[in-house]
Amino acid sequence: MIKQIQLLAGILFLAILAYAGIWYTVAFQAEKDVAALLSSWRNQGLKVEHGKIEHGGFPYRITVGVKNLSVGTRASGLRVDTKNLQLISHVWTPQHWLVEASGLVATAAKGSTQITSNTLIASYRVHDDGTTLVAFDNTATQGFSIIKLFGMDTVTPEKWQFFLRFGEDANKTQSGLYSARSLSFKVTSSNEGLSLDMIGGISGPTIRDWSKEYLINWSFEGGLLEVDSAVLTAKDSQLKGNASLTLDDNFMPLGSASLNLTGNATISSILEAMGLQTITPLHTQNGPISVMLQNGELSVNGVTALKLKPVID
């Protein structure tokens, strides 16, 4: 009996020793991978600053913490600052990480879009086919607020989910004048009787800086923002359709949208419910709506509704 207990204890000790060895190997490698990733972003031309990088979490989790991380383009295209970034996984789930950011401030397009959050948690999963899925939702956030959206004041939805998918699966075969899709997205949100469901993607080369050089290269190389399907539902109205957008030679939005409005509300009232404002009220009633963006103007059913501004000065 004593020999059996000793044997069992020996096996248990070896198992613990083996697990500890595996844990430290994976944890040290994860720390190195994060440092290498940040270094590669810097080599690609991004501005990357951070404090100490260290692993932890033994024995139950593997964590990699990054203090005072700041990542942004050289020009004012995109900037993300967080006081503390924590990556969380386990030995048995090396391709799935939770990313927890504290004190998050994100700005895009020269500050025209601003988002803040006390705490934001995202799921980051690499699939066997090479694609990567990043998922965010309101249940894992605290103090989340959309300050501005494309230069307009807006309302932060009570419930929302946001998914990004990129990798081999997102790179569909090139079609026509436009490049293969490099990124797909899905957004769902709801707030006091108003809901939005939208899926789409972005084609073309990666925009690594908010500069005229990168933006014109993106448009010339077949860059396209596509909304495959969007459904905006208000109390007694629904606006649904699809859209595509690129840039012209003057960095003005260029594209079109095919929409259909049902119910009693006008486009203006739906936009106002979202917290968005229009320069000229769009009094289009029920039925199909054709939206064109060209020559620095947005027109609805052939009538000019508002003047457009370049996305960069």
Image (cartoon, rainbow, N blue to C red):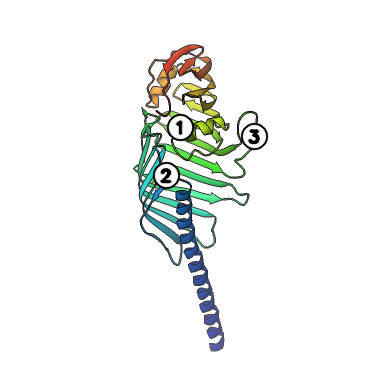
Q: Amino acid at mark 3?
A: Gln
Quadrant of the image for the N terminus? bottom right
Task: Using residue 141 as the reference point, say whether residue 226 is left or right of it.
Answer: right
Q: Looking at this view, is 35 or 99 the one in front? A: 35
Is label 1 or label 2 in front? 1
Helix, strand or loop at mark 2: strand
Q: Which residue is mark 1?
A: 212
The answer to whether one can see residue 108 in this image is yes
Q: Amino acid at mark 2?
A: Thr
Residue closer to the observer: 244 or 4 = 244
Q: Position of residue 132 (x, y in %)?
A: 55, 47
| Quadrant hosting residue 175 | top right
Q: Is residue 198 visible?
A: no
Image location of residue 69, percent across then percent down: 37, 51
Mark 1 secondary-structure assignment: helix
Disc number lying in front (3 or 2): 3
Q: Quadrant of residue 165?
A: top right
Using the numbered discs, state the Cα–Cα distance from disc 3 to disc 2 in whole angstroms. 37 Å
Crowd rating for badge 2 (residues with CA inside 10 Å; few <14, some 14–19, many 20+) = few
**Disc 1 or 2, which lies upstream in sequence?**
2
- Of residue 190 and residue 165, the one placed in the foreground of this image is 165
What is the spatial separation of the Cα atoms under label 3 and label 1, in whole angstroms? 24 Å
Label 1 with label 2: CB-CB less than 8 Å: no
N-terminal label among 3 and 1:
3
Which label number is shown at residue 139? 2
Residue at image mark 3 = 174
Position of residue 65 relative to residue 238, above or below, is below
Q: Residue at x 48, y 52 (%)?
A: 40
In contact (CB < 8 Å): disc 3 and disc 1: no
Measuring from the top left, give residue 204's x and y in whole percent. Answer: 56, 35
